[in-house]
Image (cartoon, rainbow, N blue to C red):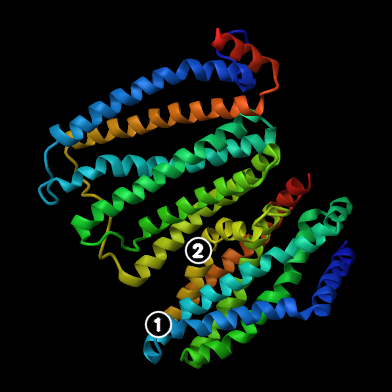
Amino acid sequence: MFRPLLALLRRDLTLALRRPQDALTVVGFFVVVVALFPLGIGPDPEFLRSLAPGVLWVAALLAVMLSLERLFSDDYRDGTLEQMLLVPEPLGLLVLTKIFAHWLITGLPLVLISPLLAVQLNLRPEEILILMAALLLGTPILSLIGAIGAALTLGLRGGGVLIALLILPLYAPPLILGAGAVDAVMHGASAQAHLSLLGAMMVFALFATPWATAAAVRIMLD
Amino acid sequence: MSERGIQWFRFTAPANFYDLAGRLIPWFAALTIALFGVGLYMGLVVAPSDYQQGDSYRIIYIHVPTAWMGMFLYVLMAIYAAIGLIWRIKIAEIMAKSIAPTGALFTFLALWTGALWGRPTWGVFWVWDARLTSMLLLLFLYLGYMALHAAIDDRQRASNASAVLAMVGVVNVPIIYFSVHWWNTLHQGASITVTEAPTMAMIMFVTLMIMVLATWVYSIAVVLARARVELLERERTARWVQERLEGERR
């Protein structure tokens, strides 16, 4: 049962590696957006430090959102997605595999590059550690929820802008918890509650969103 | 099925629904005018001023009913959307679509009146209070639902896709509410609470309930009217539509 899923994972990763600019654009966007914030609000280190969790999280969230359109659109255009509907494996699992590949390509690089940006914004080492943990738990949630929006806007004109309107309100909980975790450490509190809730949310999203995404894919390919 | 009682499924047939809605709308419209008239008169003239907030508290008679209705209608919309998606009942799909603009309107009104009320009581138009923020996110959910519905040309696909979105949204509403609540209390504690004093004068309570009822009947009237138009558009080639329109022209 898992062989086809592994094959799909390998295929998606191979495709992404053959065209690394797609993944790199997302990281580049993340870096540039964070770099623009000090220009907008001033270079005061303490002030930047207090804004850092929110800035980093909002930038990561927008970066993930921008990458979502590509999650299904290529497969949709060349008909691969239609073939996936005919495969005996449940569509929910196939979708989950694609989301996982998507996260490896876009979400994970964001987590890995985040310490660099955090240093620029004067976060301390222990805060950076929590930031990475929060992003590690949070970016999969962003990909999972975002996949629903990506599926619902398949083949629509102006789909990219529509995705933003559909899913950004749903991104509020992970944003609050993720930025809150770093904020808590900055104020000398424990981030454990935030991280636990973020983990719970990820498990719930892992369980529920692939089926909603699969339903959306079916509807849009109907 | 038994012979007695109302056969509810009769009204899932488009023609029957169309006739029933047509008969109900005038009644609910009249009730709306009457209840708003009485409620506003009582709220603005009869009810006494609040000893702390003076007359500015009177916004509550618009603010609370619209806020309740905005939240309730989203759940109702999601229920109709789910019914339409699961059992393929066309009327349910149409009801879900027809509810969305009214729900968005009420949510917007709740935010607007909240801002107007915030100015005299808190000194600012907007605070990032947990309730305000979650209402704002609710408004965005409504807008997303309507935007998705409008973006898809095929009506059936538009209904199904936005139904999925409504259901995802309704699962998320409590999560959003609690996380926003937690976020706010984490930052500034309970410096501002929107909750009224628990003891409320009887006259104020009665007036508030009349206004709540008024928003209810208004919603029913407007949603049914919108559903009727939508139904005509979707079924424009059906025979029953031709018959009805011939009858109205004569």
Quick one: SS at disc 2? Answer: helix
Quick one: SS at disc 1? Answer: helix
Drawn side of residue B201 relative to residue B237, left or right: left
Of the numbered discs in the image, which one, if any, rests on residue A41?
A: 1
Work out whether residue B188 or residue A66 is closer to the camera in this orientation and state it: A66
The C terminus of chain B is located in which quarter? top right
Which callout, 2 or 1, points at the residue further toward the start of the chain? 1
Could you tell me the amino acid type at mark 2? Ala
What is the chain letter for disc 1? A
Mark 1 neighbour density, 10 Å: few (under 14) some (14–19) many (20 or more): few
Identify residue for label 2: A172
Residue at 73 percent of width and 76 percent of height? A22
Could you tell me the amino acid type at mark 1? Ile
Mark 2 → mark 1, Cα distance in angstroms: 23 Å
Work out whether residue B206 or residue B41 is closer to the camera in this orientation and state it: B41
Residue B1 visible in the displayed image: no
Within the image, what quadrant is residue B208 found in? top left
Work out whether residue A89 or residue B208 is closer to the camera in this orientation and state it: B208
Residue at 74 percent of width and 48 percent of height? A220
In the depicted structure, whether residue B212 falls above or below residue A85: above
Within the image, what quadrant is residue B188 found in? bottom left
The percent position of residue A70, horizontal first and vertical second, equals 73, 66
The percent position of residue A117, horizontal first and vertical second, equals 55, 88
Closest to the camera, between mark 2 and mark 1, is: 1
Is disc 2 in the same subunit as disc 1? yes
